[in-house]
Amino acid sequence: MIEFRESPKAKADMPTLQMKNLCKSYQLGTHELRVLRDINVSIYAGEYVAIMGPSGSGKSTLLNMIGCLDRPTSGDYLLGGQNVAVLDDDQLSMIRGARIGFVFQSFNLIAQLNVVENIEIPMYYQNFTEHESNRRARELAHMVGLGDRLGHRPSELSGGQQQRVAIARALSNDPLIVLADEPTGNLDSTSGADILTILDRLHAEGKTLIIVTHDEQIATCAERVIRLFDGRIAKEEYNKR
């Protein structure tokens, strides 16, 4: 059985993720483009949070900040109590590999590898033994309903099955947070519903989930919805569950 860290639903003293007065701007010639402005948000262990906003609201930039794919221009970003805003590229890469599980809209599987091998990839960089990574990858594949597809490559899988592999891969390093970017965007309604059911189950088991979406229906699956507008948090809402 796959074991995850205990993540109580009740708010702990220290957030798993905390952004304080976080800003991000880009220099375009002599013009400064301010994309994120004074973002203040805390996400606690076991929460399920959706981030929404219109095109140009800063969703993608905030996703990059949360995923340690970029650094803020100013402000602090604490992940697991560590201020990752001050880390260099190599250090950020280590944080991504150890503390963040990514689920992408386009799956991002390696075509030449089978299901087990794709799931194993993050563990390779975390110094798992070959035996341990193979065992865990197989267990995760069974957990997402792919126990009969272990030797199949992405081209032999449906879109929904490929996203199941991506979710299993995201869980392989037992991350602090699972970050999903439009995880049902390339799927039909049935496959999309299956993926949301898996995410619901992970939430029930205590995983911390952050989903970026433009779909109001998908956002209702989360406990909390953070709405961005013009680079600021315009509103936070709590869904009835």
Image (cartoon, rainbow, N blue to C red):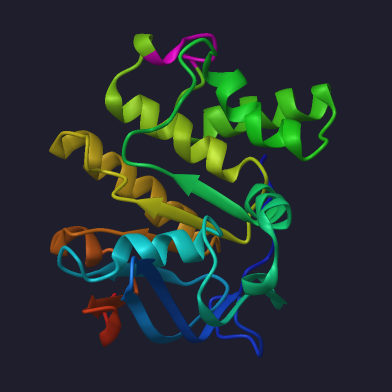
Residue at position x 68%, y 56% in the image: 95
The image quarter in which residue 164 lies: top left
Q: Could you say which is closer to the camera, residue 14 or residue 72? A: 72
Q: Could you say which is closer to the camera, residue 85 or residue 180? A: 85
User: Does residue 91 sit above or below 39 in this rendering?
Assistant: above
Residue at position x 31%, y 69% in the image: 51
Range shown magenta? 148-154
Q: Is residue 59 left or right of residue 17?
A: left
Q: Is residue 113 left or right of residue 55?
A: right
Provide residue 231's location: percent of width, then percent of height: 28, 78
Provide residue 122's location: percent of width, then percent of height: 65, 36
Residue at position x 46%, y 30% in the image: 165
Q: Could you say which is closer to the camera, residue 94 or residue 135? A: 94
**Numbered-mark total:** 0
Q: Is residue 161 left or right of residue 235?
A: right
Q: Could you say which is closer to the camera, residue 158 or residue 232? A: 232
* Residue 104 seen in the figure: yes
* Residue 236 seen in the figure: no
User: Does residue 112 sit above or below 63 in this rendering?
Assistant: above
Quadrant assignment for the N terminus: top right
